Image: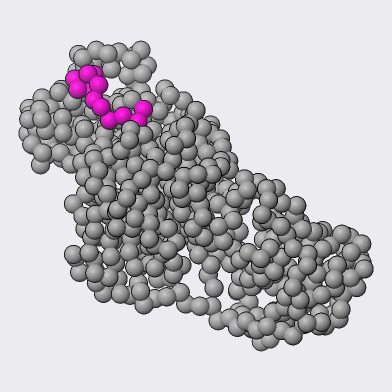
Amino acid sequence: MHNAQPMISMFFRLRSIALALAVLAIAGLSGAAQAQTEIDITGGRIDPLPIAIAPFLAGGGAEEPASTISTVIANDLGRSGYFAPIDPQTFIEQITSFEQMPGFASWRQIQAKALVTGQVFDEGGKLRVEFRLWDVNTAQQLAAQQFTASPKNARRIGHMIADIIYKAMTGIDGYFDTRVVFVSEQGPKDKRIKTLVIMDQDGFNVRPLSDGSDLVLTPRFSPSTNEITYMSFGKGDPRVYLMNIDTRQREIVGEFPNMSFAPRFSPDGQRVIMSLQDGGNANIFELDLRSRQLRQLTNVPAINTAPSYSPDGSQITFESDRGGTQQIYVMGADGSNQNRISFGDGRYSTPVWSPDGSYIAFTKQGGGKFAIGVMKPDGSGERILTEGYHNEGPTWAPNSRVIMFFRDTQGESGGPQLWSVDITGYNEQRVPVEGFGSDPAWSPKLN
Amino acid sequence: MNMNRRRIFTTAAALACVAALAACSKKSTPNLEAGNTAIPGSEQDFTVNVGDRVFFAEDQSTLSPEAQETLRRQAQWLQKYPAVTVQVEGHADERGTREYNIALSARRATAAREFLIAQGVAASRISSIAYGKERPAALCDAEQCWSQNRRAVTVITGGAKTS
């Protein structure tokens, strides 16, 4: 349908332009070792691990990026809730050489379990960044790496180092080198201007992807991290669009007789699933982005929407009010075996499969409250992570440990803001972005 | 621009109804006083003398007897002014999730549109659009506002008299 073929192939060609970045393992001072000080994240509340991040040393006038990188690492680790960065004011030893063994006794004295040292050189407009992670108790090096990158990528290097530290100490992949697309909201409620915005996971580097002239909703990342699909009210019926984040090129995903909405990519990025409206009913369809072939997956006179694939692409979870109220269902990716999985009190909606496949996150309404929760794909093990006046629209960090969502507040000056919560239900944090924001979508890992 | 002005005006008309102790929604006879200033066949005539919107119960798209009466008046008016085309806007209150509310508001717009068609208005004269919870008419965190926002509004898109 439509002659958007050339554009589509361009979407596939334009994979993310990798930042000019070289990563090298660097020789340890004492050889790499397994972490003995590990964070046990299997239980409920996690005792954050005290970690000392020594201010990175600077050479060649790299004081600013050195300070940026140290700060980014401390912020990332601290916000995760699994680490407690120690105030540098309390450090007894001042690290003056990257090549010297730290005096571990002094770091033990301030209760540090892990220590990070590093240095940054500006080598004629290129940054060379090196760091080491130490187990303070055993005096062993747990990780070390060298990066070369443009100075404008200093924050990103910080996120990558934080990811390595997180992985070394928890055994789980980090999620700091990621981005979030969301809808920035401005103006009064009855005339809200909504803009697509992309930022780093920590709220920095906020930049607009749309100009606010069209109402935009529910952006979702492609697995390639440089495309999004979303709903937009342009001329005529609201429709599902694709956008290339690097080029800002956008296109309508297909010309259908009525409104299309609630899109999401398949795990291989080759298909989009979405709802198509037909009179009073909405059903779920799959569109193959290459062949443009459309396949109907649900055919029930009800509202069937908010579909999300399992990470292996074999199943789809969605919400439907076919039984009278909004509930969560799971079906085969071909539409077979549509089974309801939510049976608690209240209305369940916006199901999203976790990247590791083990949970489905959802919004739950009941008793005048809106909660964010998780359940297993068979519907068992439901847990509410946060509850209040209005929480909605969960999205998973790529490591399946953190959920971001938006929380609306009451009152004339109220409005939606982005929050995150650990899968344990602890460590609720507001994402530090200015103004109102909703419909967050967490990217996969960038590297 | 034109759209915005119309919306402000219709909101004001709806609020006037609330102020008059819900007389507008109870009485089937329109407010004649305001009607005296409206040009017959104009947008204002339609909004004030006919009533441009119907309301729904929570999570429902069933047309109440009052809503049906309003839509019957709309159909009569549209038959009297056959050049007029309209768009039925479906809306939901903010106490629902985004995707579902889009579909729910489409369901409400469909219910109103189909009623108008059943009353004899040509389907080609009536388009519809679903706004979900994106464009509330009344702004507060209470049922008195939410009930105003669960609505289908018939908006004139062309053919109305201006003089």
For residue A158, which quarter of the picture? bottom right
| Residue A39 versus residue B93 in the image, above or below | below
Quadrant that contains the C terminus of chain A: bottom right
Q: Residue at x 89, y 60 (%)?
A: A110
Q: Position of residue A365 (x, y in %)?
A: 47, 35
Indicate whether residue B62 is drawn in magenta: yes
Q: Is residue A305 left or right of residue A177?
A: left
Q: Position of residue B117 (x, y in %)?
A: 11, 33
Q: Is residue A127 left or right of residue B151?
A: right
Residues A388 and A285: in front is: A285
Q: Residue at x 68, y 56 (%)?
A: A41
Indicate whether residue B13 is drawn in magenta: no
Can residue B151 be seen in this snapshot? yes
Q: Which residues are magenta?
A: B58-69
Residues A263 and B89: in front is: A263
Quadrant that contains the N terminus of chain A: bottom left
| Residue A53 versus residue B121 in the image, above or below | below
Q: Residue at x 72, y 78 (%)?
A: A144
- Total marks drawn? 0
Q: Position of residue A396 (x, y in %)?
A: 52, 55
Residues A389 and B125: in front is: A389
For residue A320, which quarter of the picture? top left
Q: Residue at x 18, y 34 (%)?
A: B113
